[in-house]
Amino acid sequence: MPEDKVNNITLVTCTAPVNIAVIKYWGKRDEDLILPINSSLSVTLHQDELKTTTTVACSSSFKEDRIWLNGKQDDINQPRLQSCLRELRRLARKRRCDGDPGTDALAYSHKVHICSVNNFPTAAGLASSAAGYACLVYTLSRLLGVEGELSEVARQGSGSACRSMYGGFVQWCKGDQDDGKDSVAEQVEAESHWPQLRVLILVVSAERKPVGSTAGMQTSVETSPLLKHRADSVVPGRMEEMIAAIRRRDFAAFGELTMKDSNQFHATCMDTYPPIFYLSDVSRSVISLAHRYNQHYGETRVAYTFDAGPNAVIYTLDQHLAEFVQVVRHYFPPETNGGQFLRGLPVSPVVLSEELTSSIGMTPISKGISYIISTKAGPGPQLVEDPSLHLLGSDGLPKKSA
């Protein structure tokens, strides 16, 4: 078991990625086990730009389980958090009872301290809960010596967290069993499969969304006829089409499906009663910009998708990236932070043709977009080998920088 022991405290630190769905998950058939009404598919984003880091410590001296999120102590008794802790401890006990000598007999009976930080805004529609629960489950599994199918455990924390347990292109199979044993994530293709694919996150707002995903999808399940039609009649075919498009690296098919599915997801939010509005005026302007840009070239060069929030995620290919970043900069000019407007992977500046800007023909919206994160597909959860990067100190409490 990879760990650091300091003062009889065992410490393990790992990181986990954000994922952005291109076929959306919205609606549960079982609220407690978090079983979805439809399958979904996502792209795991690279952790150099977006990640959660979690340190878990265990010791016989700890009096109770505790958790700190982004520098503040949080409620360890949240039901979903407890589900993950309970299940991982059960699996560790089972492994020990099955006679595996690699399992620490005491680790699962000791209390744990958990410290977790995101390097991106929490609860702003950037899949923070997915990365957070994937990281929690992966780190605890390393601490407790648990192996095997972990996506089922991560799913019990946050549905989409199961997809963050793998890198690249990942599907969450909805499953049919009542106990959820077949509702698991699996990798469709590794992150190395489509190296030309690039991702831009246009951060419209880092504010907490007005209607959380859990409450929103429950209301949709109860009131939206469109949601049932989507789950039963639309998504199964789209899943097959999307997997085929990814496997043959067909951006036109991938992009069109991505946009259509995002639009239908937000249509189900509108069809919910009372309706739920996650998109802002700026979000709708980004949609318009993408379609006008594609129309100018007569092909799908960029594709947008929006989760339960106003921030746009743009998929495109390497050869179109620099121009589209400049298009975004032109139509959503930053007010003051020009130097920090683009974060993440570097993008070379280009000059836009007058033909393109007159063809798009939109009025620029100042301050519409706060900043852009430039990234790509990346790997699943990673173990952090460097002990200096632990978020908890030798006393089991958060370091000041954490």
Image (tube, rainbow, N blue to C red):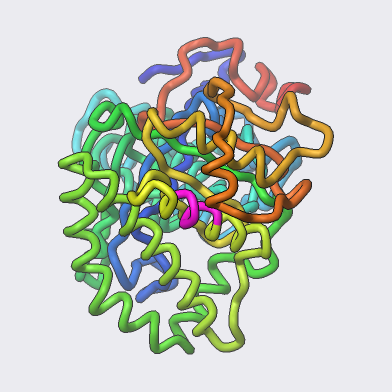
Q: Is residue 216 magenta?
A: no
Identify the image quadrant of the C terminus: top right
Q: Residue furthest right?
A: 336
Q: Nearer the viewer, residue 326 or 25?
A: 326
Q: Position of residue 297 (x, y in %)?
A: 39, 46
Extent of the magenta region: 289-293
Identify the image quadrant of the N terminus: top left
Q: Position of residue 29 (x, y in %)?
A: 35, 76
Q: Is residue 287 above or below residue 246?
A: below
**In this rendering, does residue 315 appear at all?**
yes
The number of numbered badges drawn on the structure is: 0
Q: Residue at x 20, y 51 (%)?
A: 243
Left or right of 229, for residue 315: right
Name the main secondary structure of what is drawn in magenta: helix
Q: Is residue 291 magenta?
A: yes
Q: Position of residue 379 (x, y in %)?
A: 36, 29
Quadrant in the picture for residue 184: bottom left
Q: Is residue 227 above or below residue 385?
A: below
